[in-house]
Every structure is written in structure tokens, then in C-alpha cells.
Image: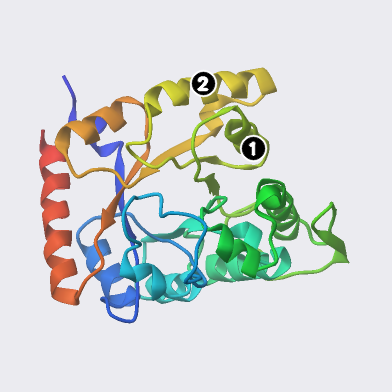
Amino acid sequence: MRTAADALSLSFGLVYFFTDQTIRPDELAVEAEARGFDSLFVPEHTHIPISRDDEWPGGGELPPEYKRILDPFIALTASALATEKLLVGTAICLVAQRDAIELAKQVSTLDYLSNGRVVLGVGLGWNTDEMRNHGVDPSQRRAMLREKILAMRALWRDDVAEFQGEYVTLSPSWQWPKPVQRPGPPVFYGGAAGPVTFRHIIEYCDGWMPIAGRGSISEKIEEMHAAAELAGRDPASLGLMAFGVPPKLQVLEHYRSTGMQRALFNLAPGTRLETLRELDRLTALVAEFRAG
């Protein structure tokens, strides 16, 4: 029989597309924290090329909010400064499209201002036209992601940081502020399961952030843990959180049984009133789950 402690072991957060037509980040952050959600995550797209080679992974027409999305780190700063305990994070940050040195500074500054409440979700991205506009060869994005995270970790960790790679060169350098979280904010890899993804997670990430509904996550968790043991890393050191989790009791119970630590609901973008109504529905669902 599931106990109250079991139910509470699964934390709940939100993923929201903030735009110039939705509720403000600081407003939603306050409302989410007041209802007991532990985290607020935002996605990233700098722009959407009108002519695209790639279809939206969700199928059908690209939702309009993709064209109007706010900058993630400015939105998260507003959210963090309006709250006291709410974790703020990216789901996901398109690291390959960013300058590693600047991104390290942005993340560490946000962690400093939030007093250590940042979670950096990272991934490869799906829009290859967007990548090319940033000068990124899509075939190199995985290698670029790896090097940029390693360089960022050096900047967060070391008083004198340096890194030499194929895509990132950092001569011995100072960069402050250091993140409050030492040796740096947790980095979660948002990507499809597989040996290559798991190799990257095990090498330089703190956990895996799969998209709910894309394959059997429970089986893949076992594969990741086995890969970690073979690589000499303690599987228990790898965190787990899923995003896009369907708001259904049986789904939440399944994720709890897998050892998932956090379930992130997609909160549909809308007006302030529409968003708060949906937030209240999710709040009621979480309360029912915890009482079950």
C-alpha cells in the first residue's frame, strides 16, 4: 500500500511557454509557489525561421507561442526574484546555440540572485534551421553541447578556469560570481533514451530529463543505471525528472514507482485567468495524489 511518504517523495513542477501574450513570469511563479509546486521550467527558442526543414516533434502545425517566447533567463530571473523557494530551470536550454562563456555567466548570476535555486535542463534541439542561423552544424551539436557544458563547469568550479576543445577554447580565466550551488547548478540532459545519450549523461550531467510518453521510461532507467555502473558511476547519483507528464493519477503513480523525483506538467500558455484556472486543476490533482 502506498504511504503518504511515498506520495510526497515525488515533487511537482511546471513547464510554461511565457510570451508577450501570457501571464507574466513573476506572477505565475508566485501563484505556483503558493499552491505547493516546487519548480518552474521554461523552454528556449531564440527565433523560428519561417521556412523550416524540420517538422515540430509534437506533430501538426507549430503552436503560435513558439514565435513569441520570452528569453528564458530573463523570465527565470523575474520568477526567482518574486519567490523564496521555487526552483527555476530550463526545459530545455539550447546550449549548442549559445556562447559557453556567456552562458556560464548567466547561469551563475541567476543562481547567485536566486540563492541557489537553478536547475539547468539542456538538450540538442530539433529545429536545424534555427541552429544554422546561429552558425551551428546540426551534425556537431552533440559534441558542442558536451564541450560547452564541460567548459561551463570549469568556470563555475575553478578560481582559475581553462578549457581546450574543438569547439571551445578558454585560456586561464577568472569569472565570478560563482554559483551558490557548488560545484555548480545541477545539469539535466533532456533527450531520448539510448546508449549515446546515457554516455553523455553519465560523463557530465547530474541526471536525465526525458519527455513523458516517448517509450518506456522505466526500462530505460534500468539501462541508464546499468551503463552508469559499467562506467564506474553510482547510479544513485543520477537524478530523474520527466517533463510533459500527463495529468493523470495512474501516470503519476507509475512515475513514482520508477524512482522519478520530479514530474513536470505542461501548463498551456494563455491569459492570466486561463492559466490560473488550469493551475488550480493541476493543484487539485496533486492534492488527490498525495491523499491517495
Q: How many marks?
A: 2
In percent of width and height, residue 6 lies at 25, 30
**Residue occupying the point 78% across, 57% down:** 158
- Quadrant of the frame with the N terminus: top left
Relative height, residue 264 to residue 173 (above, below): above
Where residue 141 appears, as percent x and y from the top left, is 66, 51
Which colour scheme appears in the figure? rainbow
Question: The residue tagged with tag 2: helix, strand or loop?
Answer: helix
Give residue 171's position: percent from left, percent from top. 89, 63
For disc 2, the neighbor class at 10 Å (few under 14, some 14 to 19, many from 20) is some
Q: How far across and down, in percent of the image, does residue 172 sit?
A: 89, 63
Q: Is residue 147 left or right of residue 30?
A: right
Report the residue at 53% width, 54% height from top.
Answer: 125
Give the side of residue 15 with respect to residue 167, left or right.
left
User: Along the horizontal axis of the image, is 211 left or right of 1?
Assistant: right
Residue 69 in view of the camera: no
Residue 24 appears left or right of 113: left
Residue at disc 1, secondary structure: helix
How busy is the neighbourhood of tag 1: few (under 14 within 10 Å), some, or many (20 plus)? some
**Which amino acid is tagged 2?**
Glu
Which quadrant of the rendered structure holds the C terminus?
Answer: top left
In which quadrant of the rendered view does residue 4 lie?
Answer: top left
List the residue tagged with mark 1: 200
The quarter of the displayed image where residue 273 is located: bottom left
Nearest to N terminus: mark 2 or mark 1: 1
